[in-house]
Every structure is written in structure tokens, then in C-alpha cells.
Image (cartoon, rainbow, N blue to C red):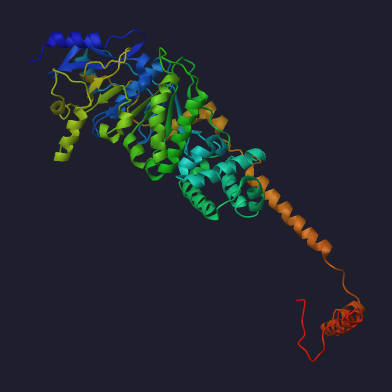
Amino acid sequence: MADKNAFIDSIKTGYSFKGENFPLGVAMLDGEVLTGTIVQLPLKTMNRHGLIAGATGTGKTKTLQVIAEGLSDASVPVLMMDIKGDLSGIAEAGTENDKIKERYSKMGLTWSPKAYPVELMTLSNEKGVRLRATVTEFGPILISKILGLNDTQQGLVAMIFKYCDDNKIPLLDLKDFTKTLQYISDEGKAEIEKTYGKIATTSTGTILRKVIELQQQGADVFFGEPSFEVDDLMRISNDGGGMINILRVTDMQNRPKLFSTFMLQLLAELYAVLPEAGDLDKPKLVLFIDEAHLVFQEATEALLQQIETVIKLIRSKGVGIFFCTQNPQDIPASVLSQLGLKVQHALRAFTAADRKTIKQAADNYPETTYYKVDDLITQMGIGEAFVTLLNEKGIPTPLVHTMLVSPRSRMDVLTDGEIDDLVKQSKLVRKYEQSIDSNSAYEILSAKLADAEQKSTDEKNTSKKEEPNVIEKVLDNSVTRQVGRTAASIITRSLLGALGLGGRSSTKKKSSWF
């Protein structure tokens, strides 16, 4: 039997923080819920990133919902990637039931329902705020990474961007990029090579095929205007709550490149736009990626590199990133090592491989004398988890088996009618709903080609001779031309002979200048 008093003291000391915080749950030891031993989450270290892991059905998504609610209550905006489509209920207040009553009775806490300010977003044509970005905003490096190009092909993409910049030709959507690619490999090839160097036709063909592959995953609806402004992710509602932005990407499994494209652009934009902030009392924005194992399974190499880089650097911009997945091993080690807060729900051991995985997962957490982690990790109930995080000094807090609080908002999805009402009330939906087709590369180059074709036609028409008269027709006759050539030949030879330049005797072999 563990020393209960020593354990309680360690938890109270380890989870007491300066500044704002909010409760995640109550500590447990030997199956007992220790009323009054609150496990708090400090806002000051929420930009140190985090992981929520556990088997299907153990309550990961509800934990994500609880943390998002706590952040919103503290006026911290949130962006959630809703891959399963079950997070929209945050917009409506929850309903108390017997399970909630029983849970809160054990914890000695009170529960009250609350609806949260929510903005629904989409990368496609679903209801919500349309997220778009222009090709120019991505730049040649990100576009090349998305398409998976080699060094030679990346050089060609850089050339395309340089040509468009020099000639003030906007690259807004994939139609513009494709048109420019076609132009420099055909009608404009001579013009481009004169200024920028040789172009390999095989490279342009390969790039074009990869662009088509991206288009087939629906990228056309993402690239274009108006571009989404990242400042719109960091809004505060009228009642002072942080806005919870829910990006519905339920079809991500079938469109990995589109999601990778969005993630690359968003992370790059956030890092580029936000100023250095250092250690703030609370983050400016927190991103939650639910079912993150799907992201890492389907992600391009470019996205993995980008996430690893941004995870290490974006903390200083005041942004936190949380991954929600089934097993810690789903996250690359280089990313996992950067995640300060870890909430580990139960894992299931059905095979020898499962037991090995559980052992590895247990080794990721701080050592403790109060729990046998690799055993308890398979026995925890729904809504229970191991918790550890970094305190203000960057030191891991004691590992604690926690009974988690319940979400105050609805633990279910919105109805179609409720979604319609939410969309109607949104100012951002009206701001971004209309696609703008500006005069850009497609129109400019098409007009340029049309002008060149018209000019060529006009030149042909002006050089065309008038209808010949009877004499001209006679002179143009093939027989007449042959007679003329024969006469001219005789006259020329006579003249050359008179000048002493004529041919030798006919009995000898003739020579020619030709």
C-alpha cells in the first residue's frame, strides 16, 4: 500500500502553479478518488505542446474537448481539426446525466452546462468558413515540397515564380500555375530561356502530372482568393471567451495531400506572421489535431519535416500544438520529445506486439513509486488517464492517475438545423464565402497568346499577294518559267564567255561552282 499522505502532498505541490490554470481532474491512488487533490493545467506552459493518447473508446476526444473549453474560458482561441466529425457539439450546452452525477460526486466537484463560441470551417464546399490561400503565398519552396519534386524540378518552379514576379503576373490558383507551366514549355519557351536559362521539357511534364494529382484531391477549392487571414483564428467572442474554430476534415483519409497542403501553409503562415513573444502568461492560440495518427500515416515527407521544425520553434510565438492519437508510438520520436503535456488514456493488450507497445509507452513517462504503469495503463476506465506536464521551470510534474472532469458542452454533434443557424450568424462565412477570380496568370497569358496569334494572322493577310492578272498567270506557268530559265542560262554563259570566264571545251569535263 502506497503512502497516501506522501502521494497527496506530492500531487498538491507538483500541480500548484502561479498564474491562471484550470482543472483537468482529480488524482487517484489504488483505485480511490482523492477528493480535493486537483490536477490543474497551467496556462503558462500550454505553448509547450501536448499529447492525448489512448485506445478507441477510452475518452480521448472528450479530454480534448475539456482542454479546449478550459482554454476558451481563459480567453485563449483554439483551432481543432475535427477528423471524426464529433466536435461540433461544443457550440451547445451539455445535459447532465447519471454518469456525470456519479463522476462529480466521487470527485467532490460541481458540474454546470455551458455552450462555447464556435466557428465552423472547411477546406471544401461543406458548410462553414472557406479556407483558401494563393499559390504565391505558398511560394516555390512549399509548392515544391507539396508536389514532391526533385532539385531540378524545384529549380524550374523557382523560375516560374521569378518570371511571374518580374512580369507582375499574379499566381493565385492552380489554374494560373498550370497555365504558366504550359506557357513556358511551349509558346513562351524561347522567351523564358533567353532570360532565365534552359528548360527541360521532361521536368515540366512531371510537374504538370503532379499538379493534376493534387487537383484530383480537391485542391482547386483551396487555392485561390480571398486568402484566409490567420488573425481571424485568434478572435475573442463578445462575452470574452476564446473562439473555438472547428475545421471539419472528415474526408482527410481520402485526401491526404490536400490536408498536408493546408497544414504546411497554416504552420508556415503562423510562424511567419506572429512576432516573437517569449514566455507568455497564456498562449495566443492552441491547435488540436484529433486522430493525429492519420496525419502522420498519410503525411508527405515535407509535412513531417515542417511539423518537426515548427514544433521546436513556434512555442516562442505563443502557439501550442496538441496531438490526439491512439498510441504515443504513432508520433515520430523527434516530435514526441517536444510534447510537454501528456494525457495517457488506457491501452489494450491483445497480442504480444500490443504488450511490447504498452511497455514502450510506459517508458515515456516519469518514473513513479506509486503506480506500476505498464499494468495500470491497461486497466484504467473510460475518462481516466495518466497525466504529466512541464511546470514553469520546465521540470516534469509527478505522474498521476487522474479521474478526468467531463465536458460542459454537448458530447455529441450538432444537428443540420443547428449547423445552419451557426453558419448564418457567422461574419467570417460572409467574408470568405465568395470566390474571387481576379485577372491573374491564366487570363494574362491567355490574352498574350491570343494577341500573338492575331498578330501572326494579320501579318499573313498583309503579305498575301493580290489576285494575279492574265500576264502574271502566263509568266507564273511552269512551262513559261522553264523556258525563261533556259534562255537566262544561255545568255549567262554567253556573257561569261565574253569575259573569259566561260566553261572549257565541250569535249572536256565541265566544272561547276556548285
Q: Nearer the viewer, residue 476 or 195?
A: 195
Residue 150 as seen in the image, left or right of residue 30: right
Q: Residue at x 90, y 77 (%)?
A: 472
Percent position of residue 387, x then y: 24, 21
Q: Residue 512 at what x, y percent from top left?
A: 77, 79
**Residue 437 can be seen, yes or no:** no
Q: Position of residue 498 (x, y in %)?
A: 92, 81
Residue 200 visible in the displayed image:
yes
> Height in image: 234 above or below 487?
above
User: Which quadrant would residue 30 be assigned to in this image?
Assistant: top left
Quadrant of the image containing the C terminus: bottom right
Q: Quadrant of the N terminus?
A: top left
Vertical order, 456 against 337 (above or below): below
Taking the spot 30% from the left edge, 17% from the top edge, the residue there is 390
Q: Is residue 3 left or right of residue 458?
A: left
Q: Residue furthest left?
A: 1
- Residue found 39% across the figure and 32% down from its top: 307
Image spot of residue 172 (x, y percent): 59, 39
Tell me: 272 left or right of 287.
Answer: right
Q: Residue at x 13, y 28 (%)?
A: 375
| Residue 18, image quadrant | top left
- How many marks overall? 0
